[in-house]
Amino acid sequence: MKQYIFGSTLGLVILTVLQFITLSPQDQKLRVYFLDVGQGDSILLVYPTGERLLVDTGKDSKVFRSLDGVLPWYDKTINYVLLTHSDLDHVGAMSDILDRYMIQKLFISEFFEQEEVGKEIVEKSRQKGTEVQILKKDDVLTFGTKISNTFDIVHPDANCFFVYKNTNDCSLVALVTYGSSSILLTGDIAKEVELQIMPEVPSPLTVLKVAHHGSKNSTDEQFIQKIKPQYSIVSSGENTYGHPSLEALAVLNSASSTIWNTKKDATIVASFDGSTAVVKKLFDQASFFQSSICTIFLYGFDTPC
């Protein structure tokens, strides 16, 4: 029993040290993690200052498995959360996120509380001491780093719900710039909105988060041919909607975009140093460390490893 306790404690210490070294990079890179949350969206931006912005949460606790592969287990701070709209596959885990992490500020659109789930999230956020801020078109956020960066809201404006009459098309859409690189985060907008925001999007775009999980009603051909995304990230899982659609994939392929899909590739990380971008599958450090420590220190004991 003493050997078990000693091995477990030593393993935890080594895990903590390894995570501190590998998950706390000291460089000037912005890292954008497209988290594997099944059929849903969740994206974590980690700035060189350590500031963290979570865009959407996915629908359930799957988000924690992905976050544990990116953030040290002992660190329970996410500075900001932005919820694009109130669909459950984008906000379903928010209540649990508020219970597990310290959230400084929640960003939402003026349409977010039109659904009951949105009202409940805002109420709980305020109870937890999280500041709630409304964002709209032309609002700009910046983060503390030596490299020029912006987080521009390009949609929606105050007339959105009158025009489109649905929450998907009134998703918060953000254009992130970091040096010469650009990332478009699209929520669940459809083709009509893509065409509306087209003048706001640079060409070529570095990374596109494909709208609405690759729905056939999104990924307009004219839009894609204009912005020419170097990389396109589809966030999807097992579903009955046909996401991503063959039509959307064909449009992206016709623009010579490199396509990644969380359903196939799990969590995907895009790293930006201000002039270049690298996109790859995330090495699952949490599973690797756990299995390694279990093998080395707990071999032969009856453990859940």
Image (cartoon, rainbow, N blue to C red):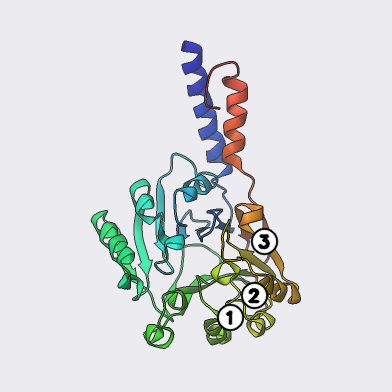
The label on residue 292 is none
- As measured in the structure, the alpha-carbon distance from the residue carrying label 1 to the one carrying label 2 is 7 Å
* For marks 1 and 3 on the same chain, the one whose residue lies earlier in the sequence: 1
What is the quadrant of residue 178 in the picture?
bottom right
Element assignment for label 3 = strand
Image x and y of residue 85, in percent: 41, 69
Element assignment for label 1 = loop
The C terminus, quarter of image: top right
Q: State if disc 2 and disc 1 touch (CB < 8 Å).
A: yes
Q: Which residue is farthest top?
A: 2
Image x and y of residue 296, in percent: 62, 22
Residue behind mark 2: 205
Type of the residue with mark 2? Leu
Type of the residue with mark 3? Trp
> Is residue 227 rendered to the left or right of residue 91?
right
What is the quadrant of residue 121 in the picture?
bottom left
- As measured in the structure, the alpha-carbon distance from the residue carrying label 1 to the one carrying label 3 is 20 Å
The label on residue 201 is 1
Residue behind mark 3: 260
Residue at the image position 35 percent from the left and 75 percent from the top: 111
Image x and y of residue 174, in percent: 50, 73
7 in relation to 118, above or below: above
Element assignment for label 2 = loop
Visible in this render: residue 277? no
Visible in this render: residue 18? yes
Residue at the image position 45 percent from the left and 48 percent from the top: 61
